[in-house]
Amino acid sequence: MKKYESLKKQKQAMKLYLEGMAKKAIAKELNVHFTTIYTWHKQFNWEEKLEEISQKVDKKIIESVEEMKEKHIEIINATIVKYADKLKDPNFKVSASEVARMLQHELELRVPKTIAQYNFMKKETNVNLNFPELLRAIRNGTGI
């Protein structure tokens, strides 16, 4: 095999490996002996490259999820503000469960999923989860 062809196959092999293909399947696909693939794997640190890519992907996913959470929180907050303004009108009908559901969604987006973390957040922020009382306060304009 010529040096250029070898280099080309090394790159193809690494690409296939990083895409999740098994080393024996790569050897078969590229018509290369499987020990050559194992040698390239070790020689060119494919595991390290795979780990670097995984970390970058994880970081992007976390950033994307955080952005989506913030957008959802903005939408919920805007809806709550709209409801709060309308609640001052005695003719406007909304159930306490609807408002409670919106507030609960906001809390779920902001709060980690463990009970201990939830209780800590509730204690630290003094969140009032008495929704009927909250609705009466908003309707009367007395605040919380």
Image: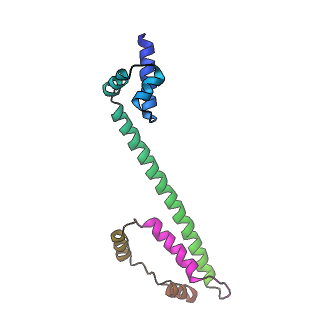
Q: Position of residue 33 (x, y in %)?
A: 39, 19
Q: Position of residue 117 (x, y in %)?
A: 35, 69
Which residue is at 62% across, 82% downward? Answer: 94
Write down the quadrant of residue 81 in the picture: bottom right
Residue lying farthest to the right in this orientation: 91
Magenta stretch contains residue 97: yes
Write down the quadrant of residue 101 in the picture: bottom right
**Magenta stretch?**
90-112
* Quadrant location, the N terminus: top left
Q: Position of residue 15 (x, y in %)?
A: 45, 29
Q: Position of residue 50 (x, y in %)?
A: 38, 36
Q: Is residue 112 left or right of residue 79?
A: left
Q: How is the image coloured?
A: rainbow
Nearer-the-camera pick, 17 or 65: 17
Label count reads 0
Magenta stretch contains residue 11: no
Which residue is at 59% across, 71% downward? Answer: 79
Please identify the dominant SS of the magenta region. helix
- Residue 77 drawn above or below residue 1: below
Residue lying farthest to the top in this orientation: 2
Which residue is at 34% across, 22% downward? Answer: 35
- Residue 144 drawn above or below residue 21: below
Which residue is at 55% across, 69% downward? Answer: 76
Nearer-the-camera pick, 77 or 60: 60
